[in-house]
C-alpha cells in the first residue's frame, strides 16, 4: 500500500481543479479455496489481487478511476485525468490527515489463511462420504471452502485515515437427488467472519443429512399450485424477501434519485405495525459485518422500520449529497474496481410475538416456504420475485405434502403491509448481494413470518 | 502494465515453472481497460476510467493442474505463484487427466481486432451523445418522469497465453455499449420502468431513432398493464426473452456437466431433443458478431458447427479435458473463467425462420407475448430444466398484439419448451454471452403455464 504522503500527493493532484472532495481507496486481497465433487478434489486455487480507486466529487458529480497497477506515477496520472473530468465550480480544501484508525469485526482464533488445504479437504470429505452412503437417491455431492483476507485503506480530503481488515470464510455443501429425469438439490452455505474454529465447530454431518433430506423430499414432490394464497416464510434465509422487497428500496442509490417506491416516506407507515427491521453492520464475527465502511465511516446499527414506521434510509456520501442528509456508514463495494455506494450488511426483521407453531396452526390453507432461493426487485416499480427451494402445503393448520418449483411474486410496497404474523425465532443466514457496486457479503434474516396473500407461481392450476 | 512487460515476465515464469518441477506449465495475462459515463438529470453525473490486469499461472504435476493468480508481476510473485500452484497440485485428486497443449502447426497464434473506431470513444463524444439521448428519451412522452439510468461504456481486452509446449497465443477485442432505463407514471399512479440497450464497435453506427422507437415500445407499451387469468397459453417469446431463457440452460450443452451427471443431455448426442424447426449453430468468426474468436484459451482452433441441427443434438461443447474423457477431439471451447478452464461458447446463432414477428402472432391467434423474464438466477433448476419466472408481456388477440400484461409467472421445463417450438421468427437480436454473443429470433412455443390473478379480465 502507498504511504500517507503518497496518498496525499494523489489527493492534491485530484483536487487540483474543481473537486470539493477526493478519496483514495486501496485494497489488498488474498484468497484460497478448495472444491470437491463426489469426494474428488477437482479444484484448488490461490489468488492475490490489489489495486487503488480514486474518487472525486463536486456536488453530485462524480469521477471514479481505478487501476491494479500499484505504481505511484500511474495513479498520479489517473488522478490528473480525473481532475480534468470533474465538473465543479470552485477548488476544494484538503483537511489535515487524522491519525490512522485500524478496525475489524473479524473475531479470529484460528486464521483460515494458515490452515493447510489438506485439512479443508479432509473436513469436506466427511460430508461426501456421508451423503453418498445416505441414500441411493443421492447421486452427487459438491462442497467447497473459500476463505479470504481483505485489507482496505481509505484516505480522503476530510482527513479520514482508516484501515479495515476482514477475514471471511464460507462453506458450501450441495447434495443432489436423482429420480428418473428429475434432479433436485439441498444446500447449506454458511459464512462467517470468525476463524477456522467456525469450521471445526460446524455440525457438518447433521447439516449434510438435512441437505440430503431436502433433496430427496423435493425429488419426490409434486409441483406447487398456482394461486394467490397465504404464505408462511421460514426463518433465517426467508429474510431474503425483506432484503429484496424492502431493503434495496431503502438504499440511497435509488432513494437519492427518487427511483424508489419509498422515496420521501420517512415517518410514514410502510409496513404492518407488527414489523420492525434493522440493518446492523456491527455484529462481531457476522458474515455481513464491518467496523468501518468503504468510505472510511464508522458502521452502524440502523433501525430501518419500527412498528411499521419508516425510520431510516441507508445513505452513502453521494446519496447524502442528493438527499441533503448525512451518510449512515453503509457504503460498500466488491473491490477497488467499483465506486462505493449504499448497501445492506446484516439486515433482518426483528423478533415478534408469535410462536412459529401457532403461525402454522392458524393457517387453514397456504404455502410454507422453508428454504428460499434467491430473488430480485425493481425498486422503481416494486416488482419482486423469489424462488422457493423447499416448500410444503399447509392444510387445516398442519404441514401437508412437500411441493417444488414455486416462485413468489408481488409488489414490495404491498407485501410489507400484508405481514400478519411475526414469529419469535429470528435467525440470520449468509448470502451474496449484487448491485451497482458489485457483489458483497450480506446476511438476511427474520423469524418465521406469515404474509396474508402472495401470488405463488407454480405449475399446477 | 503493458503486454510487452507482461510477455517478458511470463516467459521467465514458465521457464522457472519447469525448473521448479512442473511437468508442463502455462501463464496467461489479461489486461482490461474501460471508460464509461453516466448521465442523470441533464448532466454527466459520473465518469469512470480504469486499467486492470491479472496474471494466472497453472502447472501440471502427476496429472493434477494447480492454479494461482496475482496482479503483481515481480520476482517475489514468481515464487508465490509456483509455490501456491504446486501446493494446490498436491491436494488435488481429480481422476481425469488435464493437459497443457500446443498444436505443432499452430504454435504462434495471433488475432488482433482492435477497431480504428475505438479512438472515437472519448469523454466528450460520450457526454454529447448521452445528453442528447437523455433529452430525446424525456421528449418521447410526457408520462416519462425520469431517465434513471443511462450509461455509455467502452473497453478493450488484450489477452496473452504462453506455455512450456511452445504456445504463444495473443487475442484481443474491443467494444462499446449504451444502456438506458426510464420510469413513467401510469394513469392509475403506478410506476412502470423499461429501457433498451445497444452494443457495437463504432459509436457512429448507433442509430438513435431506431433506439428510441424500441425504447418507447419497451417502456410506454407497459402502460395499463395488469395480470391475466392463470392457465395454459400459446406463447411467443421475443428475441430478448428467448435469448435470456436459452442462455440460462445452455450450460447443459457442455461436456463436463454431462460427464458429471449434472446435465440431462448426457448420452443424447445424435438424438432428437428439440423441435425440428430449431437449429443452433456456433460460428466463432460470425460476420455480424463484434468479437471474432479464431482459437480458444487452450490454443485449440475454433470451428463452425451445429449444436442443435433441426432438433437433433449434434454435438456438445468440449475442452481438452472433457474431450479426452470422451475419446474425441476438443471442439475449441476451452475458455478461462475463475480458477480454471471450462467449456464456454463463442458466437451462438439460433437460425432464423421465415416469419416476421407479426406473422408469428397471426399464426398464434390467441395467446401471450413474453417480453421480460426476471429472476433467472433464482427461479430455475438448471439441471432438471424446471423454471418458474416473473414475467411481463402482452396478450395476443385475434393474431394481433393486445393489452400489456404484468405480475404473472411463467412455469415449465426447458427440455419440454424446446420440443414445443412451433415456429421461429426472422427478427434477430444479439446480446453478449460467453466469450462472444448470442443471436436469437423470437419463437412461438405451443403452450406455457401462466400464473396470474384470477380476478383479472
Image: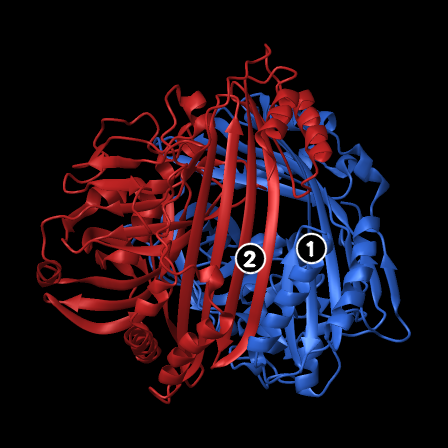
Chain colours: A red, B blue
Q: Which mark is residue B76?
A: 1
Compare marks 1 and 2 and give the one earlier in the sequence.
Answer: 1
Residue at 85 percent of width and 53 percent of height = B112
CA distance for labels 1 and 2: 44 Å
Residue at 45 percent of width and 45 percent of height = A165
Disc 2 crowd rating (10 Å Cα; few below 14, some 14-19, many 20+) is some
Q: Residue B398, how many percent across, how many down?
A: 49, 54
Residue, disc 2 = B244
Name the chain letter of the residue that bears numbered label 2: B
Name the chain letter of the residue that bears numbered label 1: B
On screen, residue B286 versus residue B186, left or right, reads: right
User: Are discs 1 and 2 less than 8 Å apart at CB?
Assistant: no
Whether A211 is drawn above or below A33: the answer is below
Nearer the viewer's eye, disc 1 or disc 2? Answer: 1
Q: Can the viewer see residue A285?
A: yes
Q: Could you say which is closer to the camera, residue A153 or residue B350?
A: A153
Q: Residue A264, how many percent across, how many down?
A: 32, 25
- Labels 1 and 2 share a subunit: yes
User: Image quadrant for the N terminus of chain B?
Assistant: top right
Residue at 68 percent of width and 50 percent of height = B72
State the SS at label 2: helix
Q: Could you say which is closer to the camera, residue B238 or residue A133?
A: A133
State the SS at label 1: helix
Q: Could you say which is closer to the camera, residue A270 or residue B352?
A: A270
Q: Residue B107, how many percent across, how many down?
A: 88, 69
On screen, residue B439 versus residue A359, left or right, reads: right
Residue at 22 percent of width and 39 percent of height = A271
Amino acid at each position: 500500500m502507498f504511504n500517507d504522503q503518497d496518498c496525499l500527493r494523489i489527493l492534491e493532484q485530484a483536487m487540483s481543479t474543481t473537486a470539493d472532495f477526493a478519496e483514495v481507496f486501496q485494497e489488498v486481497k488474498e484468497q484460497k479455496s478448495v472444491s470437491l465433487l463426489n469426494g474428488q478434489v477437482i479444484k484448488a486455487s490461490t489468488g492475490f489481487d490489489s489495486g487503488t480507486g480514486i474518487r472525486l466529487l463536486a456536488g453530485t458529480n462524480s469521477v471514479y478511476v481505478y487501476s491494479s497497477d500499484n505504481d505511484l506515477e500511474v495513479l498520479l496520472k489517473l488522478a490528473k485525468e480525473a481532475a480534468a473530468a470533474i465538473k465543479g465550480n470552485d477548488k476544494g480544501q484538503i483537511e489535515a490527515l487524522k491519525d490512522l484508525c485500524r478496525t475489524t469485526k473479524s473475531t479470529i482464533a484460528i486464521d483460515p489463511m494458515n490452515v493447510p488445504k489438506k485439512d479443508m479437504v479432509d473436513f469436506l470429505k466427511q460430508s461426501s462420504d456421508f451423503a453418498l452412503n445416505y441414500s441411493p437417491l443421492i447421486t452427487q455431492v459438491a462442497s467447497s471452502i473459500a476463505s479470504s483476507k481483505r485489507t482496505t485503506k481509505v484516505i480522503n480530503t476530510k482527513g479520514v485515515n482508516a484501515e479495515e481488515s476482514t477475514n471471511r470464510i464460507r462453506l458450501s455443501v450441495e447434495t443432489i437427488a436423482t429420480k428418473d429425469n428429475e434432479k433436485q438439490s439441498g444446500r447449506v452455505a454458511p459464512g462467517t467472519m470468525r476463524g477456522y474454529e467456525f469450521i471445526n465447530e460446524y455440525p457438518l454431518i447433521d447439516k449434510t443429512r438435512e441437505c440430503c433430506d431436502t433433496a430427496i423430499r423435493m425429488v419426490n414432490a409434486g409441483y406447487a399450485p398456482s394461486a394467490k394464497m397465504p404464505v408462511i416464510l421460514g426463518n433465517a434465509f426467508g429474510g431474503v424477501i425483506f432484503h429484496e422487497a424492502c431493503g434495496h428500496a431503502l438504499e440511497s442509490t435509488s432513494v437519492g434519485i427518487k427511483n424508489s417506491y419509498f422515496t420521501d416516506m420517512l415517518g410514514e407507515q410502510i409496513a404492518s405495525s407488527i414489523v420492525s427491521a434493522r440493518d446492523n453492520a456491527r455484529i462481531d464475527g457476522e458474515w455481513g459485518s464491518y467496523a468501518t465502511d468503504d468510505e472510511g465511516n464508522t458502521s452502524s446499527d440502523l433501525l430501518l422500520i419500527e412498528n411499521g414506521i419508516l425510520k431510516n434510509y441507508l445513505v452513502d456520501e453521494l446519496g447524502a449529497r442528493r438527499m441533503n442528509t448525512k451518510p449512515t456508514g453503509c457504503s460498500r463495494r466488491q473491490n477497488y474496481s467499483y465506486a462505493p455506494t449504499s448497501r445492506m450488511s446484516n439486515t433482518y426483521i426483528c423478533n415478534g410475538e408469535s410462536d412459529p407453531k401457532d403461525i402454522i396452526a392458524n393457517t387453514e390453507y397456504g404455502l410454507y416456504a422453508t428454504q428460499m432461493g434467491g430473488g430480485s426487485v425493481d425498486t422503481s416499480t416494486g416488482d419482486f420475485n423469489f424462488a422457493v427451494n423447499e416448500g410444503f402445503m399447509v392444510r387445516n393448520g398442519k404441514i401437508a405434502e412437500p411441493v417444488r418449483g414455486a416462485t413468489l411474486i408481488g409488489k414490495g410496497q404491498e407485501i410489507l403491509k400484508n405481514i400478519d404474523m411475526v414469529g419469535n425465532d429470528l435467525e440470520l443466514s449468509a448470502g451474496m448481494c449484487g448491485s451497482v457496486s458489485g457483489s458483497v457479503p450480506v446476511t438476511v434474516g427474520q423469524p418465521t413470518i406469515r404474509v396474508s396473500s402472495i401470488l405463488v407461481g407454480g405449475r399446477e392450476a | 502494465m503493458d503486454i510487452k512487460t507482461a510477455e517478458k515476465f511470463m516467459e521467465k515464469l514458465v521457464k522457472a515453472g519447469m525448473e521448479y518441477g512442473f511437468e508442463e506449465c502455462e501463464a496467461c495475462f489479461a489486461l482490461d481497460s474501460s471508460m464509461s459515463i453516466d448521465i442523470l438529470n441533464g448532466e454527466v453525473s459520473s465518469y469512470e476510467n480504469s486499467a486492470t490486469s491479472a496474471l494466472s499461472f497453472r502447472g501440471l504435476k502427476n496429472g493434477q493442474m494447480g492454479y494461482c493468480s496475482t496482479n503483481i508481476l515481480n520476482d517475489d510473485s514468481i515464487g508465490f505463484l509456483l509455490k501456491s500452484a504446486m501446493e494446490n497440485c498436491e491436494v488435488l485428486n481429480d481422476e481425469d487427466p488435464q493437459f497443457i497443449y500446443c498444436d505443432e502447426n499452430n504454435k504462434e497464434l495471433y488475432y488482433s481486432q482492435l477497431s480504428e473506431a475505438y479512438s472515437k470513444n472519448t469523454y466528450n463524444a460520450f457526454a454529447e451523445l448521452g445528453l442528447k439521448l437523455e433529452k430525446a428519451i424525456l421528449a418521447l412522452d410526457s408520462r416519462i418522469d425520469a431517465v434513471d439510468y443511462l450509461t455509455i461504456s467502452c473497453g478493450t481486452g488484450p489477452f496473452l497465453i504462453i506455455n512450456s509446449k511452445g504456445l504463444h497465443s495473443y487475442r484481443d477485442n474491443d467494444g462499446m455499449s449504451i444502456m438506458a432505463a426510464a420510469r413513467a407514471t401510469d394513469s392509475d399512479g403506478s410506476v412502470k420502468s423499461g429501457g433498451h440497450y445497444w452494443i457495437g464497435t463504432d459509436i457512429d453506427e448507433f442509430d438513435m431513432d431506431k433506439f428510441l422507437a424500441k425504447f418507447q415500445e419497451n417502456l410506454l407499451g407497459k402502460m395499463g398493464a395488469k395480470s391475466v387469468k392463470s392457465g395454459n397459453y400459446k406463447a411467443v417469446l421475443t428475441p430478448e426473452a428467448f435469448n435470456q431463457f436459452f442462455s440460462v440452460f445452455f450450460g447443459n450443452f457442455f461436456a463436463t456437466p454431462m460427464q458429471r451427471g449434472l446435465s440431462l443431455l448426457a448420452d443424447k448426442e445424435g438424438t432428437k431433443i428439440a423441435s425440428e424447426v430449431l437449429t443452433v449453430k456456433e460460428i466463432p468468426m460470425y460476420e455480424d458478431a463484434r468479437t471474432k474468436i479464431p482459437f480458444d484459451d487452450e490454443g485449440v482452433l475454433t470451428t463452425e458447427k451445429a449444436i442443435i441441427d433441426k432438433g437433433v443434438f449434434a454435438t456438445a461443447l468440449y475442452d481438452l479435458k472433457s474431450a479426452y474423457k470422451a475419446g474425441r477431439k476438443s471442439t475449441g471451447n476451452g475458455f478461462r473463467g475463475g480458477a480454471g478452464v471450462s467449456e464456454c461458447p463463442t458466437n451462438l446463432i439460433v437460425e432464423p425462420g421465415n416469419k416476421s414477428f407479426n406473422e408469428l402472432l397471426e399464426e398464434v391467434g390467441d395467446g401471450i407475448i413474453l417480453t421480460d423474464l426476471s429472476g433467472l438466477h433464482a427461479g430455475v433448476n438448471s439441471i432438471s430444466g424446471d423454471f418458474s419466472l416473473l414475467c411481463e408481456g402482452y396478450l395476443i388477440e385475434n393474431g394481433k398484439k393486445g393489452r400489456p400484461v404484468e405480475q404473472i409467472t411463467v412455469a415449465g421445463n426447458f427440455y419440454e419448451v424446446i420440443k414445443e417450438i412451433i415456429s421461429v421468427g426472422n427478427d434477430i437480436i444479439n446480446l453478449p454471452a460467453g466469450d462472444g454473443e448470442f443471436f436469437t429470433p423470437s419463437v412461438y412455443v405451443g403452450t406455457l403455464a401462466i400464473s396470474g390473478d384470477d380476478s383479472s379480465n
